[in-house]
Amino acid sequence: MKPTTTIREKFKQFLVILFPILITQITLSAITFFDTNMSGKSSSIDLAGVAIGSSLWVPIQVGLSGILMGLTPIVSQLIGNNQKNKVSYQVIQALWLSLLLAIMVLIIGGFVISPILDIMNLDSNVRQIAFQFLLGISIGIIPLFGYMVLRSLIDALGETRTSMTITLLSLPINVTLNYLLIFGKFGFPRLGGAGAGIASGITYWCIFLTAIWFIQRRQQFAGLGIFQKFHKISLNAWKDLLKIGVPIGFSIFFETAVFAAVTLLMSQFNTATIAAHQAALNFATTLYMIPLSICMSLTILVGFEKGAGRIKDARQYAFLGIGSAITLSLLTAVVLIFASRQVAFLYSDENHIIELIQHFLVYAIFFQISDAIATPIQGVLRGYKDVTPAFIIAFISFWVIGLPVGYLLANFTTLGADGYWIGLITGLAIGAILLLRRLVYIQKRYGIVHDNHPQF
């Protein structure tokens, strides 16, 4: 990364950072997409089982990974402030923390997964697929969390093409393993949805080991000496990382967990409704990679400029990012309006499932608009290291407003499953408004400080 002086230069650098992150996020999302898609091609029971398993796993994955993403603004501000010698220490401490978090997930999961599935009143075959999916994916939890640390380092340095390359290499591995294990090809056992979990777990090991190789061998990382010195665990370093990472992680967790909660609550409906809901939500999540990638790019760019004291430049990047997200969300809305049947066909060959998916995809249009405002704003706030208010806003908008509204509409009106989608959209919209207010406040505050103290 380098300082910029004009809007044109900023937009160019924004795209240089954004494009590889977008490809990376879409590819990571594609792993879940192919798990869901290929399981659905096996049977609706496999699709429903993977849906339930993913609903339990994804909030934990992204929430705890979000904690580790606290490393990104730390490193980007160190780079902006020309303190590269401190980066290696922060990365090693984050890796220690990632190992602890992974072990905790494995231990706690071993005790709670079966009881949770038991109380959901699922079809016995769906319950078995969900359990086996989670069991398979557990083999990759440690490397996945480790990779999130290494990716945070790579992206914070502006080397987002490296993250893109690593993730792109992993996708054909995942698809191939899915093909072999879900459908039982070339002598492998036919495991259905359970095979998707094993395939993802192995894929996580591949991307972690590949990331280590890149950091060890690529010249742009050599000067940091990431693995050249052993650093013992430092609780003080963990405290600094958790101070930023925990609000980020919980903010992401509250957002993803509410979608998981809705999927679990919808277990009261038939298997077709569960499968269609999850398919529509999976595609909406894939589209969400656009504002999420912009969010991650803004954290890097705003953090870099803030670390160097260029507050005006940080503010300009914020406007560029949010404007781009809104524009792209309108384009994705057009896709959903005119190609909903084609999208639905990606998930199922059964006509009644396709029609249900099309119905739920209509709500995804409104998701995109709110996400285009709220998600990039969170990236800007993280760049400023202002993370706690976003965490509070996420909790209020989703769990105090969105989920209760959805529950009431689904269970006490004739809307049924649609009520949950309307509740989620309500929460997203309110969250976007509150985050926008917070951004205006932060930019005014830093603008005043910058004006009075140019050396900031």
Image: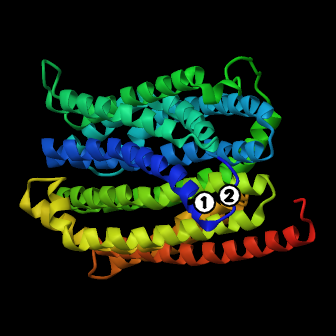
Give 444 or 51, whichever is nearer the viewer. 444
The residue at the point 87 percent across, 72 percent down is 451
Residue 4 got which mark?
A: 2
Tell me: residue 275, above or below residue 431. Answer: above
The residue at the point 41 percent across, 68 percent down is 328
Tell me: residue 113, above or below residue 300. Answer: above
Neighbourhood count class around disc 2 (C-alpha, 10 Å): few under 14, some 14–19, many 20 upward? some
Horizontal relation, residue 425 to residue 52: left or right: right
Report the amino acid beneath label 2: Thr
Q: Which residue is mark 1?
A: 9
Report the amino acid beneath label 1: Glu
Give 150 or 193, whichever is nearer the viewer. 150
Give 133 or 216, whichever is nearer the viewer. 216
Query: What is the quadrant of the C terminus in the image?
Result: bottom right
Name the quadrant containing residue 103: top right
> Percent position (x, y) of residue 134?
37, 36
Query: Are the residues tagged 2 and 1 within 8 Å (C-beta)?
Result: yes
The residue at the point 37 percent across, 26 percent down is 202
Q: Is residue 395 visible?
A: no
Snapshot colouring: rainbow
The residue at the point 68 percent across, 57 percent down is 4
> Percent position (x, y) of residue 353?
14, 60
Which of the marked residues, 2 or 1, is nearer the chain's N terminus?
2
Residue 248 got which mark?
A: none
Horizontal relation, residue 188 to residue 34: left or right: left
Q: Is residue 219 visible?
A: yes
